[in-house]
Amino acid sequence: MSIKKTLYVGTFISTIGDGMFYIATSWYVYQQMHSSFAVGILLAFSILPVIIVAPFTGHIADKYNRKSITVLMDIVRFLIILICGYVLLLTENQISIWYIYLLSAIVKIADCFFTPCISSLIKINFNDNEYMKIFSVNNTLQQIGSILGSIVTGLLLSQINVVYILFFDSVSFLLSAVIIINMDKSTVIELKESKNNVVQSFRSGLSYILNKKTIMLLIIICGAPSFVVNVLNTLLCEYTEVILGLSVGEYSILDASFGVGCVCMGGIIAFYLSNKEENKLGFIGYLLIPISMFALSITRTFYIAIFEIVFLGALIMVVSINAKTLFAKIVDKEYIGRVDSYSYTINSLFVSLSGIFAGFLSGIINVSWIFRLYSVVCIIFVICYVTLLNKLQMTSKFRE
C-alpha cells in the first residue's frame, strides 16, 4: 500500500480509538467525581508528562526509521489500554481514579512519539503543492474516525460496561499498526541518520527555532486548535449537564458535532479550494473563533448549541490545516521532527494549564463566563497569525 493511502487509512482507524478512549475516560471520570476540574486533571495527565518526553522525541523522529516508530507506538497503546480494561474488569470498575489518569498519560506519551514521525513522513515524501490537500484529507478522515468513536461510545456507555469499550478501543490501535507495517517500502523516503547525539540534536533544534522569529510565531498559532479543543473538552460535560440540563447521550452528540464541522470543512478544503486561498481562509478562521466561542457561551438551546459547535469545528479545521501547511512549508526537512516536538511541548504546557484553569474556574463561576473569558484569549492567536504572514511576505519565504 502506498504511503499516502497508508497514512489515510491508518490514522482513520487509530482516531476511532482516540474518540472512544476520550469519551469513555472523560465520562467515567466525571461520573466518578462529578467535577469538571477532575476532567481537567485527566486532560492535564494526558499532556503534562509529555512535556518531559516530547523535546527528545523529535530527535528520534529526525534520526531513526519513522515507520518503525509509528508501528511500535500503536502496539504500545494497544497493550496499555487492553491491560487497563482487564484490570477494570477484575476490580468491577472500583480502581482508583489515579489509575485512569496514569493510563491517559502513558497513551499520550506514545502519541508524542507517533506525531512527529507522521509529520516527518509527510514533509519528506511530498512537495509544497501537495501539503494542503494531504493535511485536509488526513484531518478529515481523523475527524470522521473521532466522530464514529464518539457516537458509538456515547451509545454504548448506556448499554455496556466501560471495560468492553476499552477492549474495542485497544483493537483499533492494533489494526492501525498492522496497516502501517504493510506500507509499501519503495514509496517511503527516509533521510540519512544524523550522527549527533541526543544533547547535540536538542541544542541544534532549539538554536534553529530561536534564530527564526517566523518559527516562533508558527509555534504559537499551531497551539490555537488544541487550545480551543482542550477548553471545550474540559467544560463540555458540565455545559451539557448544568447549562443545557441534558445527559450522556446529548453530550456525545455535542462532542460528535464538533467533528461533523471539521469533516465538512475538511472536505471543502480538500476538493474545492486552491492553495492560493489558504491564507485568506486561515485569517477568517482565526478571526471567527473568538466570536464563535462567545456565541456558544450565551446559548441555552440544545439544537442551537449543536449548530454552534459544528461551526466551531469547521473553524478549527481551517486553522489546523493552515497551520500544518505553513509548518510543512517553512520548516527545513532535517529539523521537522524536532520543531514539531518542541511545538508540541510548548503548546502542551500552555494548553494543559488552560484546561486545568478552566476546570478550576468552573467551581467558582458559571461555565458560560469561562467561554467568554477564553474567547478574549483567542484574539492573541489572530494577532500572531497576521504578524507571521507579514514577516513571511517581507522575507519572501512563503511561496503561494
Image (cartoon, rainbow, N blue to C red):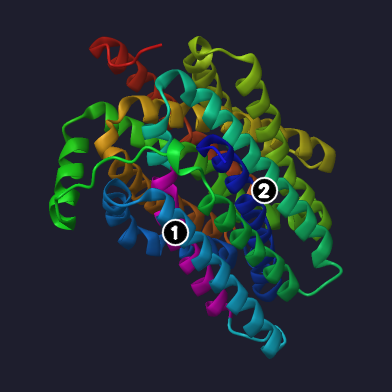
Label 2 CA crowd tier, 10 Å (few <14, some 14–19, many 20+): many
**On residue 146, which mark appears?**
2
Between marks 2 and 1 in the image, the one whose residue lies nearer the viewer: 2
Classify 47 as above or below 294. below
The amino acid on which the numbered mark 2 sits, given as a three-letter code, is Ser
The residue lying at 60 percent from left, 77 percent from top is 84
Q: Estimate the x, y position of residue 246 in percent, counting from the top left.
A: 83, 55
The residue lying at 79 percent from left, 42 percent from top is 300
For the residue pair 382 and 258, the one nearer the viewer reads as 258
Rendered-image quadrant of the N terminus: top right
The residue to which callout 1 is attached is: 47
The residue lying at 59 percent from left, 60 percent from top is 173
Classify 335 as above or below 77. above
Dot 1 falls on a residue whose secondary structure is: loop
Rendered-image quadrant of the C terminus: top left
In-image side of 103 versus 264 (left or right): left
The amino acid on which the numbered mark 1 sits, given as a three-letter code, is Ile
Instruction: Reply yes or no: does residue 117 show up in magenta.
Output: yes
Q: Which residues are magenta?
A: 97-118
Classify 67 as above or below 186. below
Q: CA distance from mark 2 to mark 1?
A: 19 Å
Dot 2 falls on a residue whose secondary structure is: helix
The residue lying at 33 percent from left, 49 percent from top is 61
